[in-house]
Amino acid sequence: MNCRCCNGEAKKFGKFKNVNRIVQRYRCLKCGTTFSDSQPLTGLRVDLDKACQVVHLLCEGMGIRAIERFTGLHRDTVLSILESAGEHCARLLDARIRNVNGSWLEVDEIHTYVLKKEVNTDETGEFFTYLSADMSSKLIVNYLVGKRNRPNTEAFLQDLKTRMAGRFQLTTDAYQAYCRGGGAVGRVFGNDIDYATEKKIYSQPISPKLPNTRPATLIAIKRVPRIGRPDMKLATICHTERLNLSVRQFTKRFTRKTLGFSKKLENLRHAVALFVAHFNFVRTHGAHGRTPAQAANLTNHAWTINEMLSATI
């Protein structure tokens, strides 16, 4: 064990017991600093089993106040668990989702808002969650929560590039930042991938002020090869659109026309990190009966929530 201050050698220096377990202490032989083993959900004094229950309920789409009533914990404590677990999951995903051997990826964005739709600032208004998914394993490779613009699109694709092990086929929608005028995909990947876009064309909806209204209907799908030689039979984003439905079903902050939307941007980011980690490592996918991380050979078993929150990074 090395010291966290000077990186000198540290020796065991007693133990203490908290509400969750016995914790080992250490003392640096060089600078004399004492410190403890890292613990799950740093900064919280809630029993770990109770925190796991809260995380489980959050990942099943329950709202903050509903969890407060169900568990007896104060809503501020529930939000503290969300913050600590979200930060841990973000670090876990950044460390573990690497060198993915995917051959067919799809990318899409899911819309939500923070505080108010009408007030668009850096911290409030409309936000999009970018998601990339490997269609063989169903693994969510990376994500980004932010405004839907060119800098965020390029940052998201740069992050995706660092996580992939080899050449793959990518499909996105026809959002201009991806593909127009060179596009972010071309700037980030060059000719190292096979890339196509899919654009869905809808009929004009009838005005809601008129009687006998009906929603817009899909009338055409336009698929265009952009880079390399993509297999056009696989050039679709339907699967990531289905993933978007899972996000809305299992994360209360994405449900439409309710009061569940985020009031703070950081809490939205924590909730997305928690969903992605739970989806990848804990939840068994119906397509192949394993977790996406198992199918991608990143783990050898389905994790429990306790394992997810206690995993070393």
Image (tube, rainbow, N blue to C red):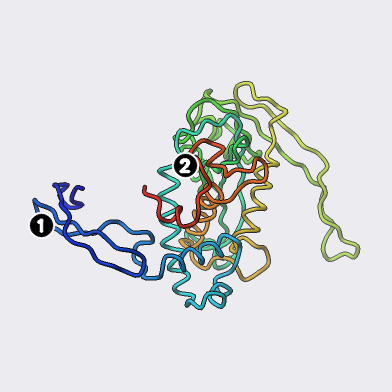
> Of residues 217 and 234, which is closer to you in this image?
234
The residue carrying pointer 1 sits among few (fewer than 14), some (14 to 19) or many (20 or more) residues within 10 Å by Cα, namely some
- Residue 293 in picture, x, y percent from top left: 53, 42
Residue labelled with disc 1: 32
Which of the 4 image quarters holds residue 168?
top right
Counting residues from the start of the chain, the first of labels 2 and 1 encountered is 1
Q: Residue furthest top?
A: 229
11 sits to left or right of 276: left
Disc 2 on helix, strand or loop?
helix
Which of the 4 image quarters holds residue 196?
top right
* Marking on residue 81: none
> Of residues 34 and 140, which is closer to you in this image?
34
Disc 1 on helix, strand or loop?
loop
The residue carrying pointer 2 sits among few (fewer than 14), some (14 to 19) or many (20 or more) residues within 10 Å by Cα, namely some
Residue labelled with disc 2: 155
Q: Residue at x 81, y 39 (%)?
A: 220
Name above or below for residue 295 compared with residue 166: below
> Of residues 4 and 269, which is closer to you in this image?
4
Report the amino acid beneath label 2.
Answer: Ala
63 sits to left or right of 303: right
Q: Residue at x 56, y 65 (%)?
A: 57
Which of the 4 image quarters holds residue 61?
bottom right
- Residue 127 in picture, x, y percent from top left: 56, 56
> Of residues 137 and 210, which is closer to you in this image?
137
Front tag of 2 and 1: 1
Q: Residue at x 48, y 40 (%)?
A: 299
Report the amino acid beneath label 1.
Answer: Gly
- State how far apart marks 2 and 1 are (Cα): 42 Å
Name above or below for residue 99 compared with residue 34: above
4 sits to left or right of 293: left
- Residue 36 in picture, x, y percent from top left: 24, 59
